[in-house]
Image (cartoon, grey):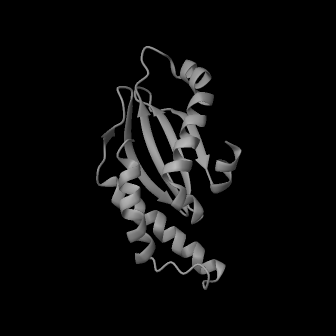
Amino acid sequence: MKFLPAILITILPLLLSAANMQTRELPINNMIEQNKEIAKLAAIELSKSLPQTIDKYTELTEIKADDTTLIYIYEINSAPKSDEVVKKEDRSRMQKAITKGVCSSSKRFLDANVSIRYIYKSFHTKAELFRFDIKSDSCGKL
């Protein structure tokens, strides 16, 4: 996670210029298509450094795009805690930390109406533990 902001800062201007961002002149349909392309290109570029160990419990395993959403998929090795305990104890804390981090490190994506989704899965069971969707209006709720 510590390298993602630097990577995003480096590639976003390239992606925006490659997609020929001219938001003041583009009809809404063209902007949506352009944002889909930005999300797709970002996912391809960011995926080149995967898998990436985030900390002793967490690994970023996949980055993909779905429409205008950039999706980060992590696996958490929370043993000996069960999946249910992790869901109950860690959700609120993680959601606040992730939203704050995304709002500061990925603001340019959010401003371009590219939303960010974080999915956390159990390393052992592969079950989904958390799903956090962050859009530009999420940042105002901090």
**Residue at image coords 45%, 72%:** 16
* Residue 128 rendering spot, x and y as whole percentages: 52, 35
**Residue at image coords 63%, 29%:** 92
Observer-nearest of 129 and 109 = 109
Residue 38 vs 21, above or below: the answer is above
Displayed quadrant of residue 54: top left
Using residue 30 as the reference point, say whether residue 49 is left or right of it.
left
The total number of labels drawn is: 0
- Farthest residue toward the top? 80
Observer-nearest of 3 and 45 = 3
Displayed quadrant of residue 19: bottom left
Residue 75 vs 12, above or below: the answer is above
* Residue 121 rendering spot, x and y as whole percentages: 47, 34
**Residue at image coords 29%, 50%:** 49
* Residue 47 rendering spot, x and y as whole percentages: 34, 53
Image quarter where the C terminus lies is top right
Observer-nearest of 138 and 81 = 138
**Residue at image coords 55%, 75%:** 33
* Residue 1 rendering spot, x and y as whole percentages: 39, 41
Displayed quadrant of residue 12: bottom left
